[in-house]
Amino acid sequence: MLRPVLGGIALPWAWIDRGPVVARIGDLAPVTAAITRAALARGILRLRVMPYWVDAEAPQAEDQLRTIGFHEAHRPDGAHACTLRIDLRGKTDSQLFLGKSKSQIRWRMKQAEREGASARRGTTEDWERLRAMHRALMRAQGRGARPSTWWSAVERFVTEGDGGALFACDFNARVVSAGVVLRHGPRATYAWGASVEDKLPFSKAILPLVAGIRWARDVGCSCFDLGGVPLEGDRDPKRNAIAMFKFDFDKRRVLLVREHVAWCASVPGAARK
């Protein structure tokens, strides 16, 4: 559970990114209610949750949340509620990137390579470069940057085990983009990426993403999640431009649970002593 702090004082709201995590959908309502009671006892008045269930199970999870007083709070510019996934099982490079339907991927890869760009596994120094590029990206979007403690935790998770990998793209003797892939059992997810603000004669994201997909396949993952696309009906040009790039890899949308929120005291049983 994440809770903002201002001037050393914890504020009265909190959220759970992609959680709570439970083994069965039927456990979601009682577990979330219990968490809400614990949150209220700690001075949290409003709680946002977004448990990670997909496709047909996503509406069931949302029904569970509604039974205890949570309501949908999805924002188009907030946490994504739809994604795309690539089946990696038994796939060769040709099947993943070079088929007839993948012509745009092949074209972008060749364009970047002709210009002299290349991708590689990231180093310790590349984490700081990614942080700087991500800060600039958030600043351009009018958003706050992630704290250094958050980045340090992600770096440890990736580098101290098999939790993921960082990939960087080099061009003209400097890093121009980087992306992080996280691994959860058989699934890998493209979690964060950023690039320099300069306009370059190729897609800055393509080579790190392709390297991440290859890595996920080679370490035994069966599925690669491309990290979110807008819901159908979202007309924002920037979000849809990113989505069109991802649709070249796979076009089937996978629906997720949308963000839900509740006043803690309104959840049944939450206010009891």
Image (tube, helix red, strand yellow):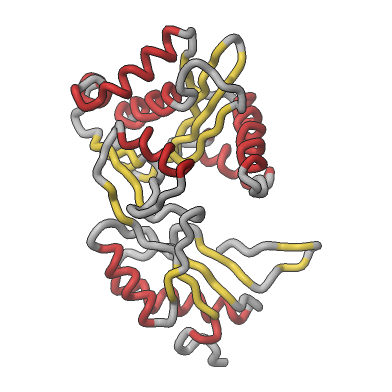
Q: Is residue 84 left or right of residue 42?
A: left
Residue at 67 percent across and 49 percent down: it is 144
In the rendered image, which quarter is residue 59 located in? bottom left
Can the viewer see residue 149?
A: no
Residue 44 drawn at (x, y percent): 62, 75
Q: In this view, does 157 lie above or below 256?
A: above
When the figure is inspected, residue 242 is found, relative to residue 33, above or below; the finding is above
Q: Position of residue 161 (x, y in %)?
A: 48, 36
- 154 to 271, vertically: above or below: above
Residue 220 is left or right of residue 73, and the answer is left
Name the residue nearer the viewer: 166 or 174: 174
Residue at point 37%, 27% (across, down): 215
136, 265: nearer the viewer:
136
Residue visible at 51% across and 20% down?
169
Residue at 45%, 25% (x, y): give it: 208
Residue 273 in percent (x, y) is at: 57, 92
Q: In which quarter of the image is the N terminus?
A: bottom right
156 lies left or right of 269:
right
- Residue farthest to the bottom, as pictured: 273
Query: How many numbered callouts?
Result: 0
Percent of width and height locating residue 195? 56, 28
Asked if one can make out residue 70 in the rendered structure from this viewpoint, the answer is yes
- Name which quarter of the figure residue 39 lies in: bottom right
